[in-house]
């Protein structure tokens, strides 16, 4: 049945964004403004991207529960949400949630706007019954009988569930595992969703995704705006390198490019490579993880000429990854971002310090997962893996009977291990977080590799550049472990296991794009070739 309402609400919003907290205001019209009803679907202001406030708390406007079956018969692609819709309305005693006595509440147009612009979330613009949703909203706006529409009501609720599943959940777990991503996926159960609605809270107000999601979404909009205006200027090189003091028409193009990217604050169209341009080039190099020398060579030119469409896709791919990351991270934790070749130590959810790392080669990929650092092993043995034993050590022994001694190795039962010492492959200390992948953090005698731009050289484990500092951090709450004692243990030549009094979560992640604390977007090479595969899944027609 259809219920009488008194008028429609014209919506005016503004948005103030601070991290994930939003504020919005609305201006509702009363009965005396009935003649001002819009002749098109009311839209929130351009900047509004939230779904604010609670659902309607009215209980006088109701519909017959049989309408749900009729609705799903007309829109069969929504049948998978039947249980959730039934549960939601049963607890409301089938009272309208998107209408009150003055018509559609402001959240209705806001949800419609979000679904209309779902591509801003880095998702394909292919929601089910998009045209039907538009027609229902439009007909409601034009309905001269001023009645609430059950199908509009149910479509809004169904689209709400679609938004929750699509935006919050991301790809399904099976497809995640096919991408070798073993971080525990954050989940938003429908029970949690329904409970939030029924207790008067709108869980969409604090979108449960990793905080990088909102930052990347803002950058996605920025890059799409740049694309709509023609994208980045193409840089046609007329020499191999450009550095401070050079003069060339190409330099003027480079200057324009860096102004568009935001690395240069002002474009004076100069063709001279001056100090200001050098700083801008270093800004660009920093954002791309390159050596910050202010010199533009072939590698930097190649990155400057990456099509903006590819960067947009890269942002979208990493937004998808954000949907998989657990939301409620503890205040103190460690993150290793493989494409960044960096380890970050977080204290109170803020980066306390970071260090360079070496990760697995593409042929020996470091696995994406999480664990808990529980042990430190000072002066560790290195148990030679069976593959290295077969392919390197045994052939070496056959050629040289002194092979083991020259490599500070010894037999240990039927296996071979390398004894503790400065030349041990694990260095002077390793950090264990028990896992089924045999991945751990460790020191290394090959210090020079930390100065390389591309640091994918290991067999899968993660080498860290400042092992002593990391050990001091992990033992900071144990007064018995002074700096002197740690250094002595690292150089003792005798293996020693230490159980941490306070364990620390560690996340091994894979983000080729992120926004740094200074608000700048960073891009890195897709060292393991995961981006395209994930993009194909996101935009597949299946």
Image (cartoon, helix red, strand yellow):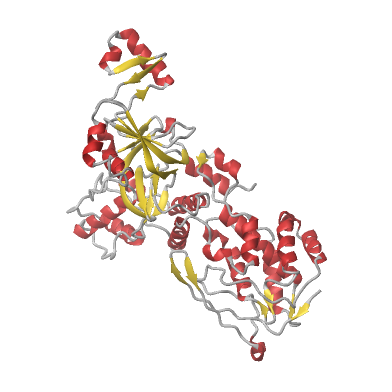
Report the side of 94 relative to 463 (left or right).
right
Q: Quadrant of the N terminus?
A: bottom right
Residue 299 in view: no
* Residue at x 64%, y 71% (from the top left corner): 55
Residue 430 in view: yes
Q: Position of residue 165 (x, y in %)?
A: 62, 55
Up the image or down, 481 lies above or below 21; here it is above
Front position in the image: 381 or 336: 381
Front position in the image: 353 or 179: 353
Q: Position of residue 513 (x, y in %)?
A: 42, 50
Front position in the image: 400 or 206: 206
> Which residue ends up furthest to the front in the rendered image?
480
* Residue 139, image quadrant: bottom right
> Which residue ends up furthest to the bottom in the rendered image?
32
Q: Position of residue 492 (x, y in %)?
A: 24, 28
Q: Position of residue 341 (x, y in %)?
A: 35, 42
Up the image or down, 1 lies above or below 282; here it is below
Report the side of 217 relative to 495 (left or right).
right
* Residue 361, image quadrant: top left
Up the image or down, 213 lies above or below 3; here it is above
* Residue at x 27%, y 10% (from the top left corner): 402
Report the side of 258 relative to 506 (left or right).
left
* Residue at x 47%, y 64% (from the top left corner): 20
Q: How many marks?
A: 0
């Amino acid at each position: 049945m259809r219920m009488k309402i008194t008028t429609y609400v014209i919506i005016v919003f503004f948005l103030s964004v601070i991290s994930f907290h939003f504020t919005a205001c609305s201006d509702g019209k009363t009965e005396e403004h009935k003649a001002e009803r819009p002749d098109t679907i009311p839209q929130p202001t351009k900047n509004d991207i939230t779904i604010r406030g609670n659902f309607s708390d009215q209980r006088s406007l109701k519909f017959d529960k049989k309408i749900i079956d009729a609705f799903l018969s007309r829109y069969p692609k929504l049948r998978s949400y039947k249980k959730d819709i039934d549960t939601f309305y049963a607890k409301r005693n089938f009272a309208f949630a998107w209408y009150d006595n003055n018509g559609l509440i402001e959240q209705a147009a806001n949800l419609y706007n979000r679904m209309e612009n779902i591509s801003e979330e880095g998702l394909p613009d292919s929601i089910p019954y998009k045209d039907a949703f538009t027609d229902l909203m439009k007909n409601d706006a034009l309905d001269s009988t001023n009645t609430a529409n059950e199908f509009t009501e149910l479509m809004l609720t169904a689209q709400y569930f679609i938004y929750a599943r699509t935006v919050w959940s991301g790809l399904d777990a099976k497809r995640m595992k096919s991408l070798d991503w073993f971080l525990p996926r954050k989940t938003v159960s429908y029970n949690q969703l329904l409970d939030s609605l029924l207790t008067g809270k709108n869980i969409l107000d604090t979108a449960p995704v990793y905080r990088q999601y909102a930052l990347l979404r803002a950058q996605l909009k920025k890059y799409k705006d740049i694309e709509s205006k023609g994208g980045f200027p193409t840089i046609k090189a007329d020499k191999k390198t450009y550095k401070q003091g050079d003069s060339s028409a190409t330099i003027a193009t480079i200057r324009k490019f860096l102004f568009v990217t935001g690395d240069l604050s002002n474009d004076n169209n100069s063709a001279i490579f001056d100090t200001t341009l050098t700083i801008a080039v270093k800004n660009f190099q920093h954002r791309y993880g390159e050596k910050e020398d202010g010199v533009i060579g072939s590698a930097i030119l190649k990155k400057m000429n990456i099509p903006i469409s590819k960067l947009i896709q890269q942002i979208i791919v990493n937004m998808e990854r954000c949907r998989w990351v657990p939301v409620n991270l503890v205040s103190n934790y460690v993150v290793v971002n493989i494409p960044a070749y960096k380890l970050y130590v977080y204290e109170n959810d803020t980066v306390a310090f970071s260090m360079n790392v070496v990760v697995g080669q593409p042929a020996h990929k470091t696995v994406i997962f999480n664990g808990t650092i529980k042990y430190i092993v000072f002066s560790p043995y290195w148990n030679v893996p069976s593959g290295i034993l077969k392919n390197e050590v045994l052939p070496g022994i056959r050629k040289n009977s002194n092979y083991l001694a020259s490599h500070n190795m010894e037999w240990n039962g039927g296996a071979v291990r390398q004894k503790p010492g400065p030349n041990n492959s694990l260095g002077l200390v390793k950090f264990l977080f028990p896992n089924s992948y045999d991945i751990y953090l460790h020191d290394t005698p090959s210090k020079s590799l930390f100065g390389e731009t591309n640091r994918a050289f290991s067999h899968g484990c993660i080498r860290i550049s400042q092992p002593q500092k990391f050990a001091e951090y992990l033992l900071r709450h144990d007064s018995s472990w002074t700096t002197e004692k740690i250094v002595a243990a690292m150089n003792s030549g005798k293996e020693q296991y230490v159980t941490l009094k306070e364990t620390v979560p560690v996340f091994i992640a894979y983000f080729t794009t992120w926004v740094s604390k200074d608000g700048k977007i960073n891009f890195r090479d897709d060292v393991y070739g995961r981006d395209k595969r994930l993009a194909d899944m996101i935009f597949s027609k299946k």
